[in-house]
Amino acid sequence: MIPVVPELPPLPALTRAEGELIDAYLAVVDLLGRINPARAADTYSGLRAAQALVARATELRDALTLMHTRGESRMHTATLDRALRVLDGERRTRLVVLPSEPPR
């Protein structure tokens, strides 16, 4: 039997630059989660993530630059928040912070 997967809510309408911003931001978050010394398993995977971070940060900068040059001077935070939530942003950003302290 095929398991039933709940349908995700649709992504809100985004400009191309907003979509690129969200994609680049989440890519940076994923890499920072892999680098997080409180969660990392080995130095090699952290090193590889740190090397990739440079390119992803450049993509993030480019998306914000594109928005700015197109006159998109305001962030539509409610829309961008919905997009981040649909794309599992809450779980992904949790990997960047310190894990809760284990009970003593």
Image (spheres, rainbow, N blue to C red):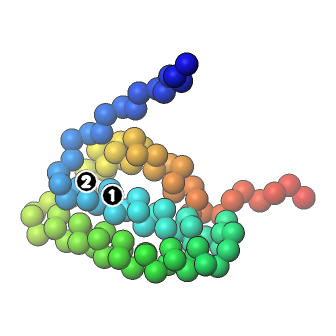
Quadrant in which residue 73 is drawn: bottom left
| Residue 99 horizontal/vertical position (percent) | 69, 59
Residue at numbered disc 2: 19
The answer to whether mark 2 and mark 1 are in CB contact below 8 A is yes
Q: Residues within 10 Å of mark 2 (few under 14, many from 20)?
A: some
- Which secondary structure lies at badge 1? helix
| Residue 91 horizontal/vertical position (percent) | 54, 49
Residue at (19% x, 59% y) in the render:
17
Give above or below for 14 relative to 101.
above
Is residue 38 among the parts visible in the rendering?
Answer: no
Residue at numbered disc 1: 23
Residue at (29% x, 44% y) in the render:
79
Give above or below for 7 relative to 18.
above
Front residue of 57 and 51 = 51
| Residue 8 horizontal/vertical position (percent) | 40, 32
Left or right relative to 32: residue 64: left
| Residue 28 horizontal/vertical position (percent) | 42, 67
Give above or below for 54 relative to 97.
below
Residue lying at the far right of the rendered structure: 104
Left or right relative to 14: residue 23: right
Quadrant in which residue 66 is drawn: bottom left
Amino acid beneath label 1: Asp
Front residue of 1 and 102 = 1
Amino acid beneath label 2: Gly
Left or right relative to 101: residue 21: left
